[in-house]
Image: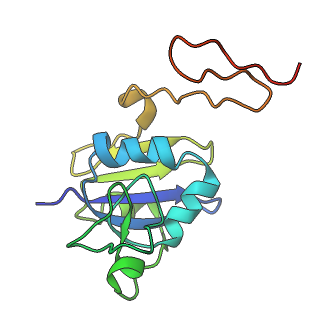
Amino acid sequence: MSTRAWIAKELDNGKYRSIYCHSDGYPSHAGMILLKHYDTEEKLDELLKLGDLSVIGGKLAPDPTKPHNHMERQEDVTLAYGRDLGEKCVGARRRDFKSITVDTDCNYTYIFTKDKTWNYIKLGQPTLVEKDLAKELKYEPQETITENEETVEAEGEEPLMQNM
């Protein structure tokens, strides 16, 4: 049986732009991928443009020279019902909170909040509790090195310095 999930972006009007994810929707898989790869509004918007998903991956675009479908899925690439499987009417939709938490047979709902953080709700519980996904998974984002900072090529090597 699949672990189904909603992936939603909170909008200003009390609605959510959301897509359905059919498989591997549990926090240690889908939740971690959302934290690592879809941590900005821009990245999430690109994911939402794909519409409903068979399974989420860390990469959006498959290699166009290789097959990408249910039988031959490219590693860590999102498999979308519309783009990859040719299904119709699977685009992102605006929904209210109840439709992505109560009136559903999904197991989890992931919400990218207006504060730009990921929360999640385990569905089917007597009381729905929205939790901070990063705290629950003990996830700490890796620092991004900018051009003006020194970089280290490999463990134990001296740092490379920018023009001095």
Frontmost residue, 26 versus 72: 72
Give the residue at x 32% y 75%.
Answer: 67
Give the residue at x 62% y 53%.
Answer: 41
69 left or right of 80 in image: left
**Looking at the image, can residue 16 be seen?**
no
Q: Check the image and name the residue furthest to the left.
A: 1
- Up the image or down, 65 lies above or below 148; here it is below
Give the residue at x 47% y 72%.
Answer: 50
Q: Check the image and name the residue furthest to the right.
A: 164
Q: Quadrant of residue 137?
A: top left
- Up the image or down, 95 lies above or below 141; here it is below
Frontmost residue, 47 versus 107: 47
Q: Quadrant of the N terminus?
A: bottom left
- Up the image or down, 80 lies above or below 2; here it is below
**At which x and y percent is residue 129?**
35, 40
**At which x and y percent is residue 144?**
63, 31
52 left or right of 127 in image: right
Q: Quadrant of the C terminus?
A: top right
Q: Check the image and name the residue furthest to the front.
A: 157
9 left or right of 107 in image: right
Q: Quadrant of residue 131?
A: top left
Give the residue at x 70% y 20%.
Answer: 160
Frontmost residue, 87 versus 121: 87
**Looking at the image, can residue 161 be seen?**
yes
**At which x and y percent is residue 93?**
48, 74
Visual colour scheme: rainbow
Q: Quadrant of residue 39?
A: top right
